[in-house]
Image: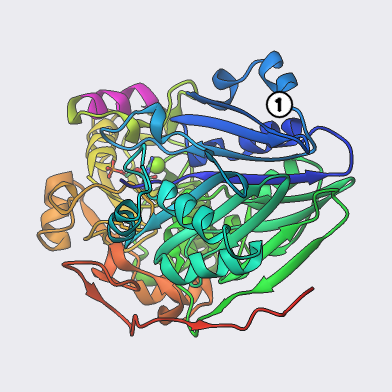
Amino acid sequence: MREKCGVIGVALEEREAAHPCYYGLYALQHRGQESAGIVTHDGFQQHDHVEMGLVGEAFDERDIEELQGSTGVGHVRYPTAGSVDKACAQPFTVSFRSGSLALSHNGNLVNADQIRDELAAEGHAFTSDGDTEVIAHDLARNLLDEDLVRAVKRTMERVHGSYALTVMHDETVLGVRDPQGNRPLCIGKLDDGYVLASESAAIDTLGGELLRDVRPGELVLLEPDGSGFDSYQLIEQENTAHCFFEHVYFARPDSVIDDSLVYDTRRGLGARLWEESGTESDVVMPVPDSGRAFASGYADAATEAIGDDAPEFAEGLMKNRYVGRTFIMPSQDQREQAVRLKLNPIRSTVEGKSVTLIDDSIVRGTTSTQLVSLLKDAGAEAVHLRIGAPEIIAPCYMGIDMASRDELIAAGGDSEDVREAIDADSLAYLSVDGVAEVLGESRADLCLGCVTGEYPYDIEGEESDRDVSRPDVADVPADD
Ligand code: 5GP
Ligand code: MG
């Protein structure tokens, strides 16, 4: 199961946590559209509401009213092929002898099956095949004989893979980011409390201030009364494995992730694309919306380099904003129809022109193939495709539902095969080094598995690009 989700956690002085959780989830809606859920704690007991659908569909006013308490966690879940199942919706809740737990998880463990087998042998009963439940049971077990901080640490030593978590243990909200910081998680200050969220755009939405990212391997514990937070660096690892694709596609452009504004990063990637493979054409246009920042960066870099000879930036495709993300359509036929439903050319900016079309990425090739034919039907003389990410040649095991190898158009052949299949006049991708340089990170600090086929984790049947031995476990300060 691959999950690419949004998480939030809130602790407030007095106000009900459900409201900020709800609006925060709205801000994170792009990270998951399959289900939405909020769990709060009123000091005595948990209240939960988890439904299939978008945030706006999953909750009505009454649901929010019934979610009492000034601490809470929330989750939006990314649609994954097959398991459209309420049992997988989150936050995942479990009650046990030492209290109640609610977990929101973004990411994917690589050793969940093994731990599930071990826990099942000890008598733990599982209700889903998800890895979040594995974390929940392991944590619940550790809490029977450890305090919260030590229990989390023991769980972090056991689970491997990517996890950005907001957890509620009784009324205490905590945030945990895996030792390699694969998925984003940040902490913000509100007027009357604190918030943990996948992306800073959620903090902005709540009128709060981004304080910083949760550090890889760090546990952040919010005071239940909203008065502050404690930090524990539980695991230290030499290198991070930040997902570059968060910056390329997944995160909102108005979010700041690991100290970079995503919009600026995308413009930088677009500029780099011009430097690496800029081409003459009449106009340069984005695939809306995902290609927009790339195209503007590309166009500006072109103008800076060759002045009046640079292609003119133009909007050549209009988007129907009432159509959801096409990726979620299960069959290829539906996906093709969906592209035409979603995007329509503006004839006057296309007819008789040579066009450089810019998108962030090619996965299956559906979007590009349809758009090249759409633009040619509208009279484009040539369509040069420029892509702001390297060729995606391998699956993602870390939380992005990116299809298996045989569905990836770039997995088998070289880029000339892809160009031919898509019927573009030319095609160029950004280099892996280009991505790392623009992100300002060394390749050793990024997860590049889907574009190199080498992963920063120990995944059965796959190569690794680093020493994936056990991380250093930091000493937990006795009492804080
Ligand atoms: P393709 O049509 O080649 O299969 O997918 C490429 C398009 O899907 C691009 O326009 C890109 O913005 C978008 N895309 C890339 N990765 C993902 C993903 O993980 N999820 C979703 N929903 N869309 C993606
Ligand atoms: Mg797109």
Q: Nearer the viewer, residue 303 or 448?
A: 448
Q: Which residues are magenta?
A: 334-344
Q: How many numbered badges does the structure rendering display?
A: 1
- Where ligand 1 lies, by quadrant? top left
Q: Which residue is depicted at the point 67% across and 38% down?
A: 24
Q: Where is residue 152 shown, x and y percent of the image?
A: 57, 64
Residue 12, image quadrant: top right
- Whether residue 457 sits left or right of residue 143 in the image: it is left
Residue 451, image quadrant: bottom left
Q: Which residue is depicted at the point 35% across and 73% down?
A: 456
> Where, quadrant-wise, is the C terminus in this rendering?
bottom right
- Whether residue 254 sits left or right of residue 454 in the image: it is right
Query: Taking the image as drawn, is residue 300 in sight?
Result: no
Q: Amino acid at mark 1?
A: Leu
Q: Residue 390, relative to residue 113: is it above or below?
A: below
Q: Where is residue 114 shown, x and y percent of the image?
A: 28, 60
Residue 453, image quadrant: bottom left
Q: Main secondary structure of the magenta part?
A: helix
> Where, quadrant-wise, is the N terminus in this rendering?
top left
Q: Where is residue 431 shown, x and y percent of the image?
A: 33, 71
Q: Is residue 360 within the magenta segment?
A: no
Residue to which mark 1 is pinned: 67
Q: Nearer the viewer, residue 349 or 130?
A: 130
Q: Specify few, some or many for label 1: CA neighbours under 10 Å numbering under 14, 14-19, or 20 or more.
A: many
Q: Which residue is depicted at the point 24% across and 24% down?
A: 334
Q: Residue 194, relative to residue 53: is it above or below?
A: below
- Whether residue 147 sits left or right of residue 340 in the image: it is right
Secondary structure category for the residue under label 1: loop
Q: Nearer the viewer, residue 308 or 121?
A: 121
Q: Is mark 1 within 8 Å of ligand 1?
A: no
